[in-house]
Image (cartoon, coloured by chain):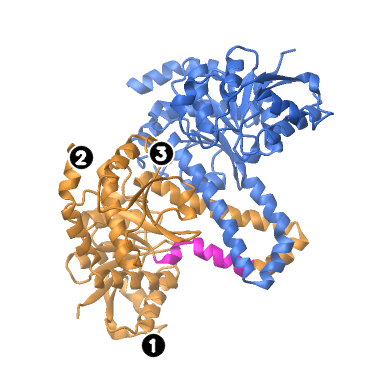
Chain colours: A orange, B blue
Amino acid sequence: MESMTIAVDAMGGDHAPQAVIEGVAEALAAENRSEPFRIILVGREKEIQKELRKYPRANRNRIDIVDAREAISMKDHLLTYWRKRTDTSIHKAIELVKNSRAQAMISAGNTGAVMAVAKTVLGSLPHIDRPALSVMVPTLKGSALVLDVGANSDSKPHNLVEFALMGKIYLETIHGIHNPRIGLMNIGEEEAKGNELTKAAHAMLKNVPSLNFIGNVEGRDIHLGEADLIVTDGFTGNITLKVTEGVMDTLLPMLRREIMGNLLAKIGLFFLNKSLNRISRRMDYAETGGALLLGVNGIVIIGHGRSSPRAIRNAIHLGCRFISNHVQEKIGSEIEALQRTLTELKYG
Amino acid sequence: MESMTIAVDAMGGDHAPQAVIEGVAEALAAENRSEPFRIILVGREKEIQKELRKYPRANRNRIDIVDAREAISMKDHLLTYWRKRTDTSIHKAIELVKNSRAQAMISAGNTGAVMAVAKTVLGSLPHIDRPALSVMVPTLKGSALVLDVGANSDSKPHNLVEFALMGKIYLETIHGIHNPRIGLMNIGEEEAKGNELTKAAHAMLKNVPSLNFIGNVEGRDIHLGEADLIVTDGFTGNITLKVTEGVMDTLLPMLRREIMGNLLAKIGLFFLNKSLNRISRRMDYAETGGALLLGVNGIVIIGHGRSSPRAIRNAIHLGCRFISNHVQEKIGSEIEALQRTLTELKYG
């Protein structure tokens, strides 16, 4: 049996370390499979010890602690500074993956910092030019994987082909979606539409036989579930994600404001509350376990800053399935097999 | 008194010609100002005549009809073909502006076709490199103007400065917002964030003294109302708009599905219905009167395909205010005054 150890950044997220450690305790308590995993909590040891005392039934002998004195705040933007500091919880957790003491790392901390440190410390998988941040977004029909949502600011056409391949393997392996429908985010359905990047990427994507490329998808198609996998550059993907959050965050206050001026509506809200909460949970990608930094040489899962204990627990289970299903190895071998096609497409 | 004649594409939109002509009739009936306007309906004359008979009280002597045999369908993508056909309702309506028989044109038809024909027939205002499609989007604090939402696929940094200037004049003149706060759509608040385009555009925008540039805004800030005016390239802007529509269109069916499985929620919905409808109207930019193609040499207002009679009426009033407030002339003179600054910024 394979060893599975997951390094968890105890200091990452708006409700750290409480929410993180509660999630870890829940994951260990719920775990009843034949492949047990271990957790290494990384952060200020005293705070971690204190929190752990709240969970006397958590399986303490499957938890290790690695002390890290510094924590990068959620709002910190001095990434060039932090990239060089090795005593942060993010850095130390990633180092554990680098040194094979852990097979995956999870942080609900500063996304920019986790990506920067992971890229620096772990580097990319062989033959991968650019890693990509991917998230599952809810759709009318279920959910769809979108990448890149912010690992890169500028992309080249062949990067989008790499994103498609990595996303495909992830969906096939972890979500059991065979030959997922891959769409290219664009501003029109026809092949000739788009900016320079999408036009060139379209031409490449349709010439990779191993990809089930269904063509361009528009902004409104994502949430309607027209594709299982949507590739885009990190700039566009990031804006897509943030706009989605913004609309959600605008609708609820608007609803509340409307309702406060209307007695009948207040009564209605009382009855509807549960349904609204369920939808807002479904739309909240924080609940789905996190974003994956695909393409770095190690498994890195980034939780939303608002991560609840449940989200942390989901992220841990996702990490376990990533390890036991050998997703990294599959990406490695498929991207290698694609090299000749990619070179031909790039240089004619 | 200035003459105000508005050419209206009678064949444009999902509910044409009915909804368009109903909107025109309403606008003429409601009009009670000192500056009367005339309408030229452009489209299949017989159909228009038949529809007009429904509105015996519409001021028929203020309506002219220009016959156009062809109508470009909403889904048509053969823009290179249509650009050359001169007997479409879109082309003939734009020709009326070109020949000064009308001072503005309105179409709720195929947005791509209207933009393509307008750019070809009217050309740009002097000193404007690229026109931009702009829409008002609702925010928690009111509304914000976003441009470009799709007139261009690729933009240069100085285009975004032009967009900012055109949007500023529009907001000041039509909406009475003095010195509007201008944000640059980006993937982080810090100046150093973004792709090549936004980094270069940021550097230019902050050096134009006449613009109240507040820096980068992120995808979620738009709907929160952090800026009055948001500039972006047409690719990103188009995706922003479509994602917003997609989230809205996903939420309501989800809500309905949740509710169908729950009696209490059904009762709640009954009481809440009015509030929900009000919000969904507020979020629907079709209701705000349409999108403006700023920067072409003529006033072109493009209604959403779903335009209701009310939206058409709003678009007509918007056209009138554009004409009587000399927005085009103001854009022309301010962009001319900016030329030296722009040249310095472009070439160092």
Specify which label sits upstream in the sequence, 1 or 3: 1
Q: Residue B114 in the image: x percent, y percent? A: 54, 27
Q: Amino acid at mark 2?
A: Lys
Q: Residue furthest bottom?
A: A57
Q: Amino acid at mark 1?
A: Arg
Residue at image position (51%, 27%) is B115
Q: CA distance from mark 1 to mark 2?
A: 56 Å
Asked if the residues shown at circle 1 and circle 2 are in contact, with their CB atoms under 8 angstroms apart, the answer is no
Q: Which residue is mark 1?
A: A57
> Where residue B287 appears, x then y in whole percent?
65, 40
Q: Within 10 Å of the Cα at label 2, are there few (<14), some (14-19), or many (20+) other Cα atoms?
A: few
Is residue B15 part of the magenta span, yes or no?
Answer: no
Q: Nearer the viewer, mark 1 or mark 2?
A: 2
**For the residue marked with disc 3, what is the amino acid?**
Glu
Judging from the image, what secondary structure is the residue with disc 3 in? loop
Quarter of the figure that contains the N terminus of chain B: top right
Q: Secondary structure at mark 1?
A: loop
Residue at mark 3: chain: A
Left/right of residue B330 with respect to residue A117 in the rendered view: right
**Front-most of residues B184 and A335:** A335
Give the residue drawn at x 24%, y 54%. A119
What residue lies at 39% left-to-right and 73% top-to-bottom?
Answer: A313
Residue at mark 3: A190
| Magenta stretch bounds | A273-289
Looking at the rendered image, the quarter that the C terminus of chain B falls into is top left
Label 2 sits on residue: A346
Q: CA distance from mark 1 to mark 3?
A: 58 Å
The mark lying in front, picked from 1 and 3, is 3
| Mark toward the start of the polypeptide (1 vs 2) | 1
